[in-house]
Amino acid sequence: MSKRRSDQGGAILSFIVIAAILVAVTLGAIYFVQQRGITARRDQAIAAANKLAADQKAAQDRADAARKATTAAQVAANQASQTSTTSTTTDQATTAGTTTTATSSSELPTTGPSNSIVTMLAIGMLMGTSVAFVRSRRALSRSL
């Protein structure tokens, strides 16, 4: 009878070791997925900021080109006549020089299914381990 108890102790010990290994692997996977998600969000935010900067630079270049064109038109108008056309081109230069740029949010939301999937996977593994432990304990008690 004492021999069976020592066999049971070995079965429990191996079960605990395997459960500890599974928990360590699960925690490692959770950490890896979270770090990868953080890196992906940071990369996306950097790309959005770079795109916004490029859009602003392009808008500035267009505004500079419009100013140069209106300045050239003003010079030509001044040479052609010194009267009312100068005031008209000044009004056109003012309206052509104003450009609007759409600003977008440079931060992405931190929500998503990755956090809930990892949590559900961890809970499922914990439940599976618990069920296996209970079944093994019942099988051992029935065999006695």
Image (tube, rainbow, N blue to C red):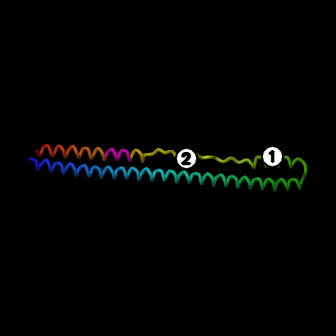
| Residue 32 position within the rendered picture, expressed as x and y whole percent measured from the top left | 41, 53
Mark 2, other Cα within 10 Å: few <14 / some 14–19 / many ≥20: few
Helix, strand or loop for the magenta stretch, by majority? helix
Q: Earlier in the sequence, mark 1 or mark 2?
A: 1
Who is closer to the viewer here, 98 or 9? 9
Residue sitting at the far right: 82
Q: Is residue 129 magenta?
A: no
| Residue 101 position within the rendered picture, expressed as x and y whole percent measured from the top left | 66, 48
Query: What residue range appears in magenta?
Result: 118-124
The kind of residue tagged 2 is Glu
What label does residue 27 carry, if any? none
What label does residue 91 carry, if any? 1
Q: Is residue 53 left or right of residue 11?
A: right
Who is closer to the viewer here, 133 or 111? 133
At 36% from the left and 50% from the top, the residue drawn is 27
Q: Gap between marks 1 and 2, in whole Å?
A: 39 Å
Q: How many marks on residues? A: 2
Residue 80: image quadrant is: bottom right
| Residue 9 position within the rendered picture, expressed as x and y whole percent measured from the top left | 18, 49
Q: Is residue 122 left or right of residue 42?
A: left
Q: Is residue 63 left or right of residue 43?
A: right
Who is closer to the viewer here, 125 or 74? 125
Closest to the camera, between mark 1 and mark 2, is 2
Q: Kindly identify which residue carries mark 2.
A: 107
At 53% from the left and 52% from the top, the residue drawn is 44
Mark 1, other Cα within 10 Å: few <14 / some 14–19 / many ≥20: few
Location of the C terminus by quadrant is top left
Q: Secondary structure at mark 1?
A: helix
